[in-house]
Every structure is written in structure tokens, then in C-alpha cells.
Image (cartoon, rainbow, N blue to C red):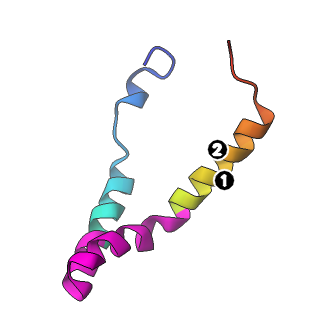
Amino acid sequence: MKFAGAGASVPITSFGNSLVHGALTELGRDGWIGVVTGIFEVTSAGISSAIIFSFLAALFVRPKG
């Protein structure tokens, strides 16, 4: 919290909206198993890019301390 300030505590509402929208859409179509698959169907590109860019950043940046 010292580094990022309030930005670390504010939720990303559009990402949360995408999670809920995908889950509710698939819940109506496939039932309870659709909740799990719907979350990843809508947000898979964002989750994948976060993992890839975090890995690339870890390759090029040395941690402090």
C-alpha cells in the first residue's frame, strides 16, 4: 500500500463485471458447471495476458532487497 497508494485497494470493476456476466450467462445455459466455465470463457484473454506479461517482467526486472 505504501508504493501504490489507493490504487492497490480499488477493485477493477470492469473485470469483475466480466466475471459475473460470463458466470450468469453460462449458469442459465449449462447449470452450475456453467458458472465455472463461464468465468474463464469471457476473461481468458485478460487472465492469459496478465500471466504472460508478469512472466516477461520477471525475466527482465530484478527484485529489490
Q: Amino acid at mark 2?
A: Ser
- Answer yes or no: do the residues labelled 2 and 1 have beta carbons within 8 Å? yes
Q: Position of residue 65 (x, y in %)?
A: 68, 12
- The residue at the point 43 percent across, 74 percent down is 41
Quarter location, residue 33: bottom left
Q: Which label number is shown at residue 19?
A: none
Residue at which label 2 appears:
54
Membership of 41 in magenta stretch = yes
Q: CA distance from mark 2 to mark 1?
A: 5 Å
Q: Residue at x 61, y 57 (%)?
A: 49
Q: In the figure, is residue 47 to the left or right of 57?
A: left
Q: Judging from the image, what secondary structure is the residue with disc 2 in?
A: helix
Answer left or right for 38 relative to 30: right
Q: Residue furthest bottom?
A: 29
Q: Quadrant of residue 18?
A: bottom left
Residue displayed at 20% across by 82% down: 31
Q: Looking at the image, which residue sits at the far right?
A: 60
Q: Is residue 38 magenta?
A: yes
Rendered position, 45 above or below 29:
above
Please state which of residues 13 and 60 is positioned toward the viewer in this rendering: 60
Identify the residue under disc 1.
52
The amino acid on which the numbered mark 1 sits, given as a three-letter code, is Ile
The correct choice, above or below, for 11 with respect to 19 in the image is above
Label 2 Cα neighbours within 10 Å, binned few <14 / some 14-19 / many ≥20: few
What segment carries the magenta color? 23-45
Quick one: quadrant of the N terminus?
top left
